[in-house]
Image: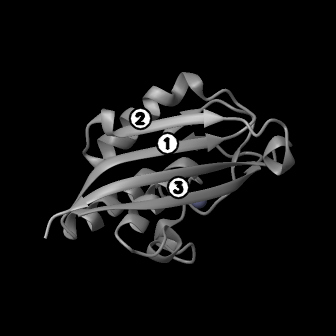
């Protein structure tokens, strides 16, 4: 049986933080605010995977009230989500994600992100799609107040 899930996440920009997207550190004047490393792309992907198996979101599985996950790499969260799927005998068919941000330019880092995400999930890089777009200057994203990410995931569940 194939199942699909959707994930959405958004974080505000904050001064004095590293910008980490898809597990890749990207040079930029500001990073994203959050309890973990605030990797908005990885969070959206993790939520899509959890959604595909009918689980609640990462906020439920990794609550930001838990001190042990303060500053945690979101790749570690994604890896744990992969383990939850494996336990339920679910194999990832594919993941596709779109990052929405006015700046910085993400294009040069997309392949590195695909490599990191696929490695953490233990799947072929061809099963991971990552794209980036701007919000055409509109709204909060257009004013560079933060970034957002959307993701979908398909998983195959064996009985
Ligand atoms: Zn998040």
Tell me the tag on residue 99: none
Residue 158 in view (yes/no) = yes
User: Residue most toward the left?
Assistant: 159
Which residue is rendered at x = 82% and y = 42% of the image? 142
Which residue is rendered at x = 30% and y = 40% of the image? 119
* Dot 2 and dot 1 residues touching (CB under 8 Å): yes
Displayed quadrant of residue 105: top right
Q: Which residue is mark 3?
A: 44
Which residue is rendered at x = 58% and y = 25% of the image? 107
Q: Which residue is mark 2?
A: 114
Residue 3 x/y as whole percent: 33, 63
Cα distance, mark 1 to mark 3? Answer: 10 Å
Residue 39 in view (yes/no) = no
- Mark 2 lies on a secondary structure that is helix
Cα distance, mark 2 to mark 3? Answer: 14 Å
Q: Quadrant of the C terminus?
A: bottom left
Q: Earlier in the sequence, mark 1 or mark 3?
A: 1
Position of 37 compared to 17: left or right? left
Cα distance, mark 2 to mark 1? Answer: 8 Å
Residue 151 x/y as whole percent: 51, 51
- Mark 1 lies on a secondary structure that is loop
Position of 138 compared to 45: left or right? right
């Amino acid at each position: 049986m194939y199942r699909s899930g959707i994930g959405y996440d958004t974080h505000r920009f904050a001064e004095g933080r590293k910008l980490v997207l898809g597990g890749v550190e990207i040079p930029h004047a500001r990073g994203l605010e959050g309890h973990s490393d605030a990797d908005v792309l990885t969070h959206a992907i993790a939520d899509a995977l959890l959604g595909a198996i009918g689980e609640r979101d990462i906020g439920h599985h990794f609550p930001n009230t838990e001190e042990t996950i303060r500053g945690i790499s979101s790749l570690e969260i994604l890896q744990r989500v992969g383990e939850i799927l494996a336990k339920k005998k679910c194999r990832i068919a594919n993941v596709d994600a779109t990052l929405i941000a006015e700046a910085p330019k993400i294009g040069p880092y997309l392949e590195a992100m695909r490599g990191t995400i696929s490695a953490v999930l233990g799947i072929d890089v061809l099963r991971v799609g990552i794209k980036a777009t701007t919000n055409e200057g509109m709204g909060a994203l257009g004013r560079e107040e933060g970034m957002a990410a959307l993701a979908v995931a398909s998983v195959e569940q064996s009985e």
